[in-house]
Image: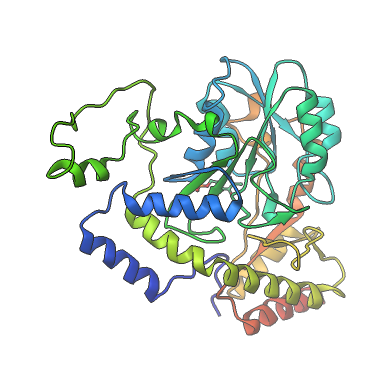
Amino acid sequence: MNIRLFKPSLGEEELQAIKEAFDRSWVGLGPKVNEFEQEWAKFTGSEVAIALNSATAALHLALACFGFPEGKKVLVPSLTFSATASAILYNRLIPVFVDSDPVTLGISTEDLDRKYDKDCVAVMPVHYAGHPVQMELLMPWAQERGLKVIEDCAHTAGANYKAKMLGTWGDIGCYSFEEKKLMTTGDGGMMVTNDPELFKDVKAMRWVGIDKDNWKTAQEYTHANRDALHWFYELNVLGYKYNMNDLAASIGLVQFKKLPHFNQRRSEIIRLYLNRLKNIKGIEPLLPFEPENYPYQMFGIRTDNRDGLMIYLKNKGIATGCHYTPLSLQPLFKPWGNNCPYIEKEANRFITLPLHADLSNEEVEYIVDTLIHWNK
Ligand SMILES: *Cc1c(COP(=O)(O)O)cnc(C)c1O
């Protein structure tokens, strides 16, 4: 047995889509990126979606959209991937780490109240593992304080929470198509908003400062607009090289069609895990999983002998992980950390178990049987 923790589900259709990009000889920022953006905007019910080379880039630009003065503070959960908090430092802002809700592991509303002060300008809820943060409570809380809300949706895609897509509750939502996520483009990300004015500079910011479709320019070069100054562009904002390219978008458009099937399969696997884990002493599910309501990017458990069990599972050919070491304990973030007592301790009990759309029922049975055996 050799069971992977995460695995992208890729097939012939993706290969074919890449081949078509080759045949067009357009593999950079081009029409497929636009098409993917339009699909994603429709899918999430957003006015605008902009595709990037990662969610890390999306989070960086999302904060940059607001032009906050240097040194202002941003509230961020300690239990997240590095990128959520790195985006704050990229923008020369100060991360304020917030503890987790013990049940949902989302950003704690009590700790938010404790950590908030008038230098705070934004809050970045993370739908950890795909479990929704209680946005119906967070949004009014943030609005009363004039805080902008950026949702880190790296672990979710297409989740309807109280009749509204996750990623559209806040001002901006950021999705990831990194290879471990719900669907992949190799690397990639998307940012969405329902306030187009907010994104007026994002196309330039993601592409070296130029807000122009160069594939259209190339098309028009030889025929249309003979007198147009096609070589002219203006640099008005500081841009990065953060664009998605047509190769990634080609894969993304195929994966997007498969996403409902992937999400359904992940939910089935979680249901199987939950049923079989019910009666194992000393092991509890990581979260109050609701696989019939939301897609999840991760499945996991909590247990006291975390390290012992992880090594045991490794010897049985089962890959596991810990998501995450709380950022408030990481050397990089320590100057602002050591202030989330619940999650800094509790995360030592977390084990992430294999979850991906190609995982078979037999593999899940084997994992659960191995857990039962260890427990005896
Ligand atoms: C993966 C991840 C990111 C970053 O995504 P990339 O596309 O790899 O840059 C951000 N936040 C969370 C919570 C993640 O899991």
Q: Residue furthest bottom?
A: 362
Check the picture and name the quadrant holding the N terminus.
bottom right
Q: Nearer the viewer, residue 134 or 178?
A: 134
Vertical arrangement, residue 70 with respect to residue 186, above or below? above
Q: Position of residue 164 (x, y in %)?
A: 71, 50
Which residue is painted at 52% across and 53% down in the image? 40
Q: Nearer the viewer, residue 221 or 3?
A: 221
Check the picture and name the quadrant holding the C terminus.
bottom right
Q: Nearer the viewer, residue 366 or 97?
A: 97
Q: How many marks?
A: 0
Tell me if I can see residue 89 in this picture: yes
Which residue is painted at 78% across and 52% down in the image? 162
Q: Position of residue 12 (x, y in %)?
A: 37, 76
Q: Position of residue 324 (x, y in %)?
A: 65, 48
Q: Position of residue 112 (x, y in %)?
A: 80, 31
Horizontal placement of 41 versus 77: left or right? left
